[in-house]
Amino acid sequence: MAYCTAEEVFGQIKESAYNALLGDEYIEDPEERKRRLQPFVEEAMEDADAEIDGYLAKRYDVPMSPAPRVLNKFSKDIAAYNLMSRIGIDEQDRDKTYLNRYNAAIKFLEGVAKGTISIGTGDSGETQTQAAQKGFRIEHSDRLFSRETMKGW
């Protein structure tokens, strides 16, 4: 199951970049350009989801279904980066946004893999709210020292 849709990835890419992504051939019709880009977008999505699953597999069962909303956002960002990296990303240009979003996604996923960031689900698939409603329990040993047993010391 994909964490985002092709339409969401197309929404991340500027239409002016469609022809550059296709190569040397210029296509006037926007729908034809999208149709020809579809296989590249799907490949970029598959790569993005595999990359996300690689980070999540350490702590969660993957692929996640239903996926938390945050995975949708990062899947779109990573897929857009994967797609734009086909033609190269100029770090001095406005294309750097794709690189910045990709780096932010990877930083987030590394935090999830380390356990410092939660994506809102427990290991068993329950949400954190559900886990918190169950409460917590503390067990302790019997008290060894008290005012009564310490008298005279």
Image (cartoon, rainbow, N blue to C red):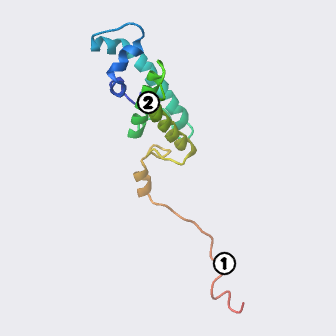
- Identify the secondary structure beneath mark 1: loop
- Among the 4 quarters of the image, the one containing residue 45: top left
Residue extending furthest toward the top: 25
Label 1 belongs to which residue? 144
Identity of the amino acid at label 2? Tyr
Q: Nearer the viewer, residue 125 or 72?
A: 72
Label 2 belongs to which residue? 98
Which corner quadrant holds the N terminus? Answer: top left
Residue 152, given in percent of the width and then of the height, sits at: 71, 93
* Residue depicted at x 52% and y 43%: 112
> Taking 78 as reference, is 148 above or below it?
below
Identity of the amino acid at label 1? Leu
In the image, taking residue 87 as reference, residue 150 lies left or right, namely right
Looking at the image, can residue 33 be seen? yes
> Taking 43 as reference, is 70 above or below it?
below
Classed neighbour count for the residue bearing mark 2: other residues with Cα under 10 Å, few (<14), some (14–19), many (≥20):
many
> Taking 24 as reference, is 97 above or below it?
below
Foreground label between 2 and 1: 2
Residue 57, given in percent of the width and then of the height, sits at: 54, 36
* Label 2 or label 1, whichever comes before in sequence order: 2
